[in-house]
Amino acid sequence: MPELDFLALAHRIGQKAMRIVRSGQGRDIVATNPLGQKTIKADKDLEDIVIRELKRSEIPCTLTTEEAGLVKFSENPEWRFVLDPLDGSENYARGIPVYTLGLCYAQEGGTVSDVVESYIIDLVRGDEFYTHRGKGVYVNGERARPSTVKSMRDAIISLDFNKEMLYRQIGAKAQLALMGCRDHRRFGPDLFDMSYTACGSIDGFVHACGTLSAVHASGVALLRENCIVTDRCGKPIDVALDVNAQMSVVAAGTKELHAELLTALNTDDLHGF
């Protein structure tokens, strides 16, 4: 990365973002983003922080972001940054204290699997999750380890069952099979669940319906360092770093649990999706 300390940049962004959300302001809807979701003012305010910081850095780059889509800072970009400025904006708007910011980068033209460094901050507690490819996951500067749970019956899994599409695509039997875990969690922002899976607090993560935007690449990068992570068909996740690119994610701290999750997902025919 030319002349840029990514972690210092990300930390600076994270601290500024926390100051904004702690004010409790910016909950009004102001636009609709490229994914068709409502944008609240805080989404835009946090995105603007990152845009200003990248512009100031003079790094030849582009930015994929959930609110603006694609922002260009150079005619000949070398790097692609990917941002979800406020994952959990619905929680924020409703006063539920669970939301995050995620930022990562790869070479321009790269995919989710090419992410070099990734940073996620829990905007309520201030916990910072960081990885540099091949060097492990760190939480507030301390090395984090994945879960060692090997069986669904002993596992607490993050499951996303909130979309009708999930029922249509994986079927009722697969959903029931996944519910065979010890317990499940769903906090709202996927980056939150992905971060706590990467550091072992949650044993596995399943987003099966194939609609997770590539703006969540920072979460996949964390999972990749500490967990077994694939799409729901057991293949590597290799989608473009574009706001409209979508993926499914299945991750676990052990290969045994990951295999059980994939088996559960394939209990029903996936209807070719």
Image (cartoon, grey):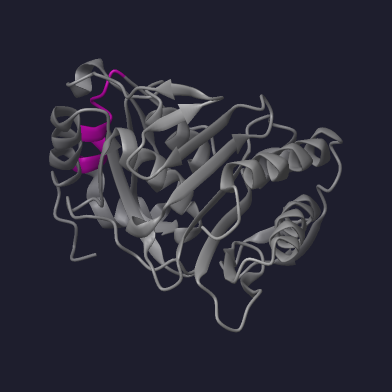
Please give left or right for residue 107 compared with residue 157 in the image. right
Please give left or right for residue 18 compared with residue 231 in the image. right
Which residue extends farthest bottom?
Answer: 75
Query: Residue 224's x, y, as percent?
Result: 32, 42
Q: Nearer the viewer, residue 139 or 242?
A: 139
Q: Which residue is drawn at 63% across and 45% down?
A: 10
Q: Say if residue 149 shows up in the picture.
A: yes
Position of the C terminus by quadrant: bottom left
Q: Is residue 176 magenta?
A: yes
Q: Is the magenta stretch mostly helix, strand or loop?
A: helix
Please give left or right for residue 124 compared with residue 129 in the image. right
Q: Is residue 139 magenta?
A: no
Please give left or right for residue 222 compared with residue 249 in the image. right
Query: Residue 14's x, y, as percent?
Result: 69, 40
Q: Which of 11 and 65 is in front in this view?
A: 11
Q: Which contiguous range is marked in magenta?
A: 173-182
Query: Residue 107's x, y, as percent?
Result: 43, 66
